[in-house]
Amino acid sequence: MHVQHYNGDYRRIADIFYDAIHTVATQQYTSEQVHAWAPYPIGYDRWYYRCELKRPFIVCDADTAVGFIELDPDGHIDCHYVHSTWNRRGVGGLLLDHVERVCRALGKPRLYVEASLIAVGLYEQRGFYRVKEQHVVVGSQLLQNFLLEKMLV
């Protein structure tokens, strides 16, 4: 496995997002919340533009993307998802380590993220701390997440 820059495979990234939410997030969120968060059909056109703008880092096994992370210029981690068949195999941590190295190399003072109930544990294991609990409206659903940050300087 290795981390690489976005390679144009926005459809695979969209599929990873959809899969992660519809398989893993169902452990903590209701069916209605999951469907609001990742509706079907998948909006591939929207994902094309998102990926072209965000240019996510991806983890590949051979030539297949298995996880991705988006890093904004200010150190904000926007999306961070791993395909369910690759959960608990180090992909999420590999992506976090990569964006931390990038931010440190660029002299960014911190990383921060709005982490789902599913992801908060991974971030805390990696030295992030909870700033506050949040409730966000997605479609007609209210979802809980946490703002976490990690100081790099």
Image (cartoon, rainbow, N blue to C red):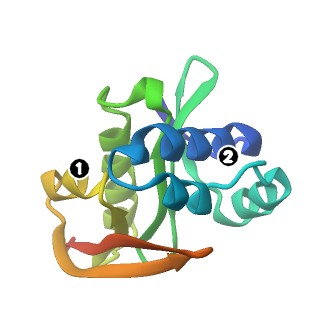
The residue shown at (59%, 76%) is 140
Q: Can residue 8 be seen in this view?
A: no
Badge 1 amino acid: Leu
Q: In which quarter of the image is the C terminus?
A: bottom left
Query: In the figure, is residue 9 to the left or right of 56?
Result: right
Dividing the picture into quadrants, the one containing residue 64 is: top right
Query: In the figure, is residue 51 to the left or right of 106?
Result: right
Residue 41 spot, x, y in % from top left: 78, 48
Q: Mark 2: few, some, or many residues within 10 Å (few <14, many ≥20)?
A: many
Query: In the figure, is residue 45 to the left or right of 135?
Result: right
SS assignment at label 2: helix
Q: In the rendering, which numbered label is found on residue 69?
A: none
The residue shown at (60%, 63%) is 36
Q: Mark 1: few, some, or many residues within 10 Å (few <14, many ≥20)?
A: some
Q: Is residue 135 above or below residue 78?
A: below
| Residue closest to the eye, 33 or 53 | 33
Give the total number of marks visible in the rendering.
2
Q: Name the residue under label 2.
A: 14
SS assignment at label 1: helix
The residue shown at (23%, 50%) is 122
Query: In the figure, is residue 94 to the left or right of 23?
Result: left
The residue shown at (33%, 70%) is 145
Q: Which residue lies furthest to the right in this view?
A: 45
Residue 34 spot, x, y in % from top left: 52, 55
Residue 109 spot, x, y in % from top left: 28, 79
Q: Name the residue under label 1.
A: 122
Q: Residue furthest top?
A: 62
Q: In this view, does 33 lie above or below 69?
A: below
Residue 77 spot, x, y in % from top left: 43, 66
